[in-house]
Amino acid sequence: MSKKKMGLIVPGGVDEYIAGQPEPSRKSLTQLRALIRECAPDAVETVSYFQIPGYSYPGYDYNGMFAWFSYQKPHVRLHVRPPVLENNHDGLKKLKSTKAIVWFPADQDLPRELIAKLVVESIHEMKGKSGD
């Protein structure tokens, strides 16, 4: 994929990020990537902010970034815009989370419905910041 500059966002680098992680985590990272892409198929996929994969729609605040994922042994992590996780506190009770990051054990099946819900809400949060 060519790296065409879009403001501060440079598409690409996600394959390399996943390949650079330990073998046991790659399956979960690939699944997390696919889930985000299902929710936002037209989003720009990049590795820029924080040197982790992220997704954006140009034209919104924070360069349109609305979701990221990363690996921190032994977890894969989904990063979304605040207050998405706070608004879904009940669904996250069994998971470690902060204001913007939720941890999933890399050796377990990912909660697809929960992840999709968080990503979609993060997109809505991003679009709401721009008055759309």
Image: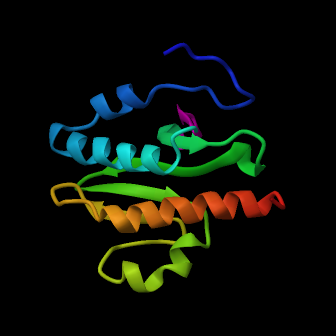
Residue 59, percent from left and from top: 78, 42
Please provide percent x and percent y for residue 78. 42, 57
User: Image height check: is 81 above or below 39?
Assistant: below
The answer to if 114 sits in the magenta stretch is no
**Is the residue 4 above or below the residue 29 in the image?**
above
Q: Choose top left, top right, bottom left or bottom right for residue 107.
A: bottom left
Say whether residue 20 is visible: no
State whether residue 4 appears in this view.
Answer: yes
Q: In terms of depth relative to the viewer, which is nearer, 36 or 41?
A: 41
The residue under the point 39% across, 80% down is 91
**Is residue 56 shown left or right of residue 94?**
right
Q: Which x, y percent locates residue 24?
A: 15, 44
**Residue 80 vertical position relative to residue 49 in the rendered view, above or below:** below
Can you name the residue that lies furthest to the top here? Answer: 2
Magenta segment range? 43-50
Q: Quadrant of residue 56?
A: top right
Which colour scheme appears in the figure? rainbow
- Does 64 appear above or below 93? above
Image mark count: 0
Q: Is residue 53 left or right of residue 72?
A: right
- Provide residue 62's location: percent of width, then percent of height: 72, 48
Q: Residue at 65% of width from left, 62% of height from top?
A: 124
Residue at (29%, 65%) from the top-left corner?
A: 111
Nearer to us in this view, 21 or 15: 15
Where on the picture, by quarter, is residue 43?
top right
Q: Residue at x 46, y 26 (%)?
A: 13
The residue sitting at the right extreme is 131
Residue 49 on the magenta span? yes
Q: Is residue 108 left or right of residue 123?
A: left
Image quadrant containing the C terminus: bottom right
**Residue closest to the far bottom:** 90
